[in-house]
Image (cartoon, helix red, strand yellow):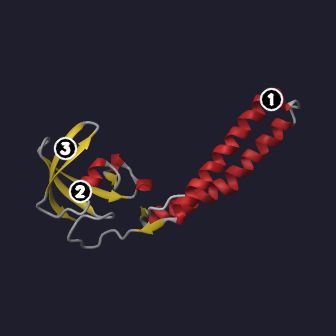
Amino acid sequence: MASKPTFVTEEGLQKLKDELEYFKVTKRKEVAEALKQAKAFGDLSENSEYDEAKNEQAEVERHIAEIEDILENVEIIQANSKRSHVTVGASVKVYDFEYQEEVTYTIVGSTESDPANMKISDESPIGKALLNKKPGDEVEAETPGGLLKMEILEIL
C-alpha cells in the first residue's frame, strides 16, 4: 500500500505495536462476541445488532490493516541528536513574528502528531515549512489560520 516512510520515535513505534495487539486480540474477541450474540436474535435480514456488529468488524479489520501498513513502512527517528538543519525528530525554537513570541515545536511523523503539546507533523504546513531549514532562516507557512511568518532561532 504505502510506499513513503512513516516517521516515528521508539515510543511511537511501541504505541503502534500495542495498539495493533489490542485490536488483534481484545477488539477482535469483543466483535466476535457481539456477532455471536446478534446471531442469537435470529433473522439476520432485519437484525440491526448484527448489522452493527458486522460494521464494527469491518472497521476493526480496516484499522488493523492500516496499522500493519504503517509498521511495514516505519522509519525510526532519533530525538535529541544535534542537527545542523531541521529534520523529523528535531525540536525547533522559532520566533513568531505575528505574536512576537518564541515558540518551540517538535517535528514528528503524522502518527505522533499532537499539536496541543507542540508536536507537529512533518506533513503539516508548519512542519513542511521548517524541514531542512537552519537557524537564521525565515520561513512562511500557509495555515488554516492564515500566513504564519517565523524565524528559526535554534535547533534543540
Q: Residue at x 66, y 50 (%)?
A: 61
Closest to the observer: 39 or 139?
Answer: 139
Q: Secondary structure at mark 1?
A: loop
Q: Residue at x 81, y 26 (%)?
A: 46
Identify residue for label 1: 47
Between marks 2 and 3, how big is the CA–CA gap?
A: 12 Å
Q: Is residue 47 above or below residue 90?
A: above
Q: Residue at x 67, y 41 (%)?
A: 56
Q: Quadrant of residue 136?
A: bottom left
39 left or right, relative to 27: right
Identify residue for label 2: 130
Q: Position of residue 118 (x, y in %)?
A: 30, 51
Q: Residue at x 65, y 48 (%)?
A: 60
The dot on residue 148 is 3
Q: Position of residue 156 (x, y in %)?
A: 23, 65
Q: Quadrant of residue 10?
A: bottom left
Answer few, some or many: residues within 10 Å of disc 2's Cα (few below 14, many 20 plus, some between 14 and 19): many
Q: Amino acid at mark 3?
A: Leu
Q: Earlier in the sequence, mark 1 or mark 2?
A: 1
- Residue at the extreme bottom: 82
